[in-house]
Image: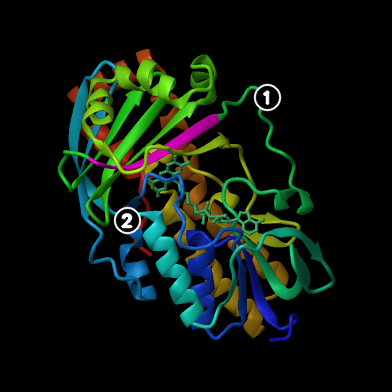
Amino acid sequence: MNNNAFDCAIIGGGLAGLTLAIQLADMGRAVVLFEKEKYPFNKVCGEYISMESHAFLQRLGIDLSGAPYITELKVSAPNGNSILRKLDMGGFGISRYTLDSQLAQLAIKKGVVLFENTKVNDVVREADSFTVKTTTQNYSAKIVCGAFGKRSSVEKSLGRAKPQHKGRKNYVAVKYHVKATLPANRIELHNFENGYCGISKVDGDKYCLCYLTDSENLAKSGNSIKAMEQNIVMKNPFLKKYFTESEFLYQEPLTISQVSFSKKSAIENGVIMLGDAAGTIAPLCGNGMSMAMHASFIAASLINNFINGTISREELYTLYEKQWNKNFAQRIKTGASLQQLFGKNYLTNISIGMLKVLPLLADKLISMTHGEVF
Ligand SMILES: Cc1cc2nc3c(=O)[nH]c(=O)nc-3n(C[C@H](O)[C@H](O)[C@H](O)COP(=O)(O)OP(=O)(O)OC[C@H]3O[C@@H](n4cnc5c(N)ncnc54)[C@H](O)[C@@H]3O)c2cc1C
């Protein structure tokens, strides 16, 4: 294929990028997708997907028969006080190793030109097209979508300002796959000083154990993850049990640092942003993946309308931004408030105690983090 022939170029092959590519290919569009890693690969993520995207993934052609349904939530405070609630909508568990690689195979089958091990370094906007510069070659496309996740070096070339960390917290995230003893239909969220840890079942005979913590906790522990787990994380009695009694399937954890939740925009220099690249929701809401896929659902039909000539470029940008804000802006704000509530020992202990006597408030908070089926 001629390098100038693409309708849409997508930067990043996570859930937002891959699902967008598949939908556009289904609509008959010429799509190129660049992913800097090689599938299959593990990702730091809690791997609980809210039910809102279950039917969507099945419609695309993904087999979810091996993904357990999750129907209840247990939350504990650092002092071990806990509540257990049924989840109205609930979710399912599947590892990113499995899901992303299944989506990548499906994309290729549908005709997406997928370059793995290919990093995008720069995007140049011209009159009515873009040039995407990768480590090996340049490609031209009518539309470019940024689906590169929380943070990427390519943001600089899009003119996006570096996130301001002054006064804002920076987070570290750690993930393991383990064999543990807890009901397969339950997700548990256990708080500890300046952090929280989720555990829930995924495909195969394993659980995902993943936590997010203030980077100060790591600094206080001499930058040793083991010491931080020993001295801070395991102070929560539930976490002590999981860390000491589970079988860890890989000893070295997967980690990411410099996670920030600063505000971003849905369009940047004409590039359409999806998933975490447009705005990152606090992981304790367990919804970032569904939001990434939902954004791709919104973007796919609008991009298709633009390529058809039904809407102009300006209309495409305005409509996408409007729909993005309508669907996700409030959820991201709610997530940020919940993250504040569950960050501090004292506040979390009080909040869990309060939610225990006001279970309907707990249900309301949970429902505010979940969206609609799409
Ligand atoms: C600790 C933690 C736990 C979480 N737990 C959950 C959970 O349980 N449930 C949930 O729904 N959400 C969870 N999330 C959020 C969820 O992981 C994200 O919202 C989701 O992965 C966003 O998908 P995405 O496609 O936008 O980005 P990603 O999945 O991050 O994909 C981006 C892709 O772009 C690639 N890339 C980046 N830069 C370039 C470049 N320049 N060129 C080419 N490729 C590039 C990356 O390699 C990556 O594969 C969690 C997040 C964290 C940090």
Q: Residue at x 32, y 56 (%)?
A: 94
Is 368 a magenta residue?
no
Q: Amino acid at mark 1?
A: Lys
Q: Amino acid at mark 2?
A: Ile
Q: Residue at x 61, y 62 (%)?
A: 117
Provide the residue span drawn in magenta.
171-179
Query: Which quadrant does the C terminus fall into?
Result: bottom left
* In-image side of 306 versus 356 (left or right): right
Main SS class of the magenta portion in the image: strand
Image spot of residue 67 (x, y percent): 25, 59
Q: Which mark is residue 260?
A: none
Q: Which of the two labelled residues, at mark 1 and mark 2, occupies the earlier sequence position?
A: 2
Q: How many marks?
A: 2
Q: Which mark is residue 94?
A: 2
Residue 334 in sight here: no
Q: CA distance from mark 1 to mark 2?
A: 36 Å
Q: Which residue is mark 1?
A: 166
Image spot of residue 331 (x, y percent): 45, 44
Q: Residue at x 49, y 50 (%)?
A: 328
